Amino acid sequence: MDITYLKKKISLLFILLGLSLQTMAQVTAANTNSQLVIKVINAATKRPVNDANVSIQSQVDGATFNGVVTNGEYVISLPRGQYAATVVHPNFKATQLPRLVIESNRVNTFTIEMLAAGSDVEVIQVFADQSRVQNSGSAGTRYLDRELLRSATGSGGDILRALDGLAGLFSRGEFASFTVRGNGPRDNLIFVDGFPFQKIVHFADGFGEQEAIEGGGRYSIFAPNIINGAEFQPGGWSAAYGGKAGSLLKLSVASGNSEQSTYTGLFDFAGFEAGYEGPNPLTQDGTMLLSLRQQDFGRLFDIIGIEDIGSPKNTDLIFKTSTSLNADTDLETLLIYATEKNTRDLTNALASDEDDPGNYEDLELSNSEADNLLLGLTLSRFVGESGVWDNRLYYRLYDEDGTFGEAYPDLVPEDTPMEAIPIREGILTSASKETEFGLRSDFSYLNDFGQMSAGLRLAYLDLDYSLSLQNNWIRFQYDTKDAPADPTQRYVVLTPDLIDTAYQDSALLSSAYIEQNFDFNAFSYRAGLRVENDGFADKTEILPRFGVNWTLSSRINLAATVGRYTQSLRFSDRASDPGNSNLQNERVDSFSVGVTYQINNNWQFLLEPYYQRLSNLLVETDGLANAFSNAGEGKSFGFDTGLFKRFDNSWSLDIQYSYNQSEVKDGPQQTYYDSDFNRPHFFSVGGLWDINESWSVSARFKFASGTPTDDFIVHADVLGETPVFENYRGLRFSKENISTNTQRFENFNSLNFRVDYRTEYKRTAINIFLDVINAYGADNPSSTEFNERTGQDVIEEGEVFPFLGIRVTL
């Protein structure tokens, strides 16, 4: 993209922001006191914690307010501003919420879960902005609260981008995806309110499409504003959860406020988000959250000059209710309905020559639609003095249809009317439908040794996939192993016999686990066993999990984990070829040991080495038919390290470095090569500064090694003078990949920054923000687009993604 064009667009955004702020400056903000409610519960038993001492400190003038928790709550009236809250109890680790943004005329409610403290070790603070450490879990476990998520630098209104800055996690920012410790974006286990929900992103590569979005999607279905908290574990999680090679991400949807109704509106160039949080008008006792978001990114792409991407549109509806049936029983309902439509028509395809008129980089035509539904019911009950029994019943549906074709403007003169340009629509048609009914039951209680937990999971899945090729389709990119038998033919031809497939199957997936946490004051030990049966793979796996947490002193903590995990295959991989139906799940054996050192009350240091052994990995045996085997092996090792300064005195900072070496091989006798998402070095530094109660600025700089890529050769004039098929004539080049991941893209570097302005008018809170991803437009290639008309392997130019938004809360 022309850098002058970008500067004009960014300047326009700043002008608009300045005009908005000038208008706000003319408004007198009401500084009426608000109510702060801090709920304190035991993280293990979920019961209220009483008699804890609470200290509230203003981040502006240092004023301090002290009190005691009664009936599980601490309530105080405070003026608008930023505060820090510290909760101390002799039987628990002291916990601090370092950044509470209090708005006027509101009931601001926050929940603190306290972890038990060993009796023979001096109690130290566990900072909620850096970690809410699970006993005997990975040292890299981190928890991000609602305020951190919705104000995260470079989030662009997306929950997955808001995770930037977590240990071992790398996010490009362009897409709503992330990789962890050399594993791919699809190697992350994701739960929403305890329900498994992997289809979390919009506009991911559909069934039958070529991999173009690095295994992720362009936008997630969750805006950060509706997520109450996100817990991230880079490995070593307990037997209660299944397996993935990457990470475990647990998202909790906000439950609403029982004391006061709040209406929120968010507006930006892409669309709007409207929400309600408050008492449930349908019941006498309970809360409700309702969120509706509609986005049309075609408008945003036109503004920033990348209209060749297409016109993606999406609508997300999220509805949640929480009701107390009695003193010991709660009932929650959750509805997520997300729809999307993505069209890339001839207008978008012709815009791909913006840098060189007539030199079209991407002439693919596509049209896809998808519906994504999750309906969940959670019944939670206290049993006895310490028992908690959670039962979740859910229904999930994912239904997607897509068509793909090509345009051929190079076969006609440049001034040819658009309607006369030859095109082939609907060359490839795909359909995928997943239906799932599930039950998840978990029970935990305290015993003489610590905490015992056990659970059962049942899920019945019905799959219906189909792929249909209208007629022969020439592809000018191929791997050497898929090359035609005729050595003079320098392209491959997809045929209906090769591509057409119809996969219909249903199976029961079941698992059960039992786990005991042994607590010995400064030392805790977790031993668990999980048994899984996958009806699609027709195999039962026994998976042991262990963890140790040892508080060596008031400042030093050691955490180690070891365990076996299975990684379920993507259903589309099973469906893509008849021979794939008998594939087995991949296996991961994982080990980590981490040390955290509390330098002082504000600074913490983390170091966590890890090792993974991978087996039963999928290996592509036929790239044209998408056929696979389980012959692959792999290993991933490295370490994550970071220095974290918690939010205090109006600023916070984190500096992180990760080293990873991730290698795979296609069989026992084959040689290792770098895995697709291996980045040996990753460095990140980010900070936040609250200038005053109205203004805040934040930024994050990232540097990383480039990802591996194949070596290739280009063949010229592969069609010759005789047309092979209709629309396949003239000069064409082909790209033959001759080795796997033996080359590497250039290093990645990016700067994101964000400016927030908060003000109030009577009962209305207004937040205006400018969030810019990849501020200086670095190219950061991780994939290329081969132009068969010129023989060039085009690296996508870097784009600046600016998001200017206004959030209004009534």
Image (cartoon, grey):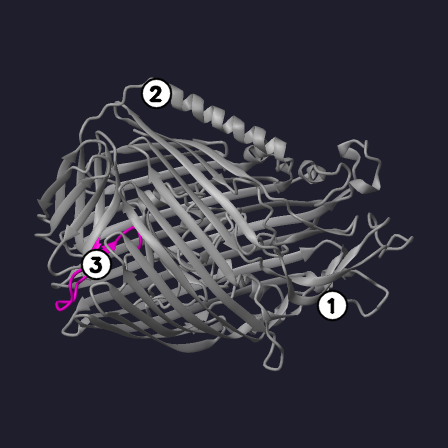
Classify mark 2: helix, strand or loop.
Answer: helix
Q: Relative to 330, does residue 288 appear above or below in the rendering?
A: above
The residue beneath circle 3 is 43
Q: Which residues are magenta?
A: 113-130
- Contact flag, marks 2 and 1 (Cβ < 8 Å): no
> Hey, which residue is sitting farthest top in the picture?
26
Residue toward you, 393 or 15: 15
Q: Viewer-nearest of labels 2 and 1?
A: 2
Residue 117 magenta-drawn?
yes
Q: Relative to 30, does residue 216 appear above or below in the rendering?
A: below
Residue type, label 3:
Ala
Q: Viewer-nearest of labels 2 and 3?
A: 2
Classify mark 1: helix, strand or loop.
Answer: helix
Residue type, label 2:
Ala
> Hey, which residue is sitting farthest right in the picture?
721
Q: CA distance from mark 2 to mark 3?
A: 43 Å
Residue 195 visible somewhere in the drawing? yes
The residue beneath circle 2 is 25
Residue toward you, 371 or 491: 491
Q: Is residue 673 left or right of residue 189?
A: right
Placement of the C terminus among the 4 image quadrants: top left
- Image quarter for residue 113? bottom left
Q: Relative to 487, does residue 792 appear above or below in the rendering?
A: above
- The label shown at residue 480 is 1
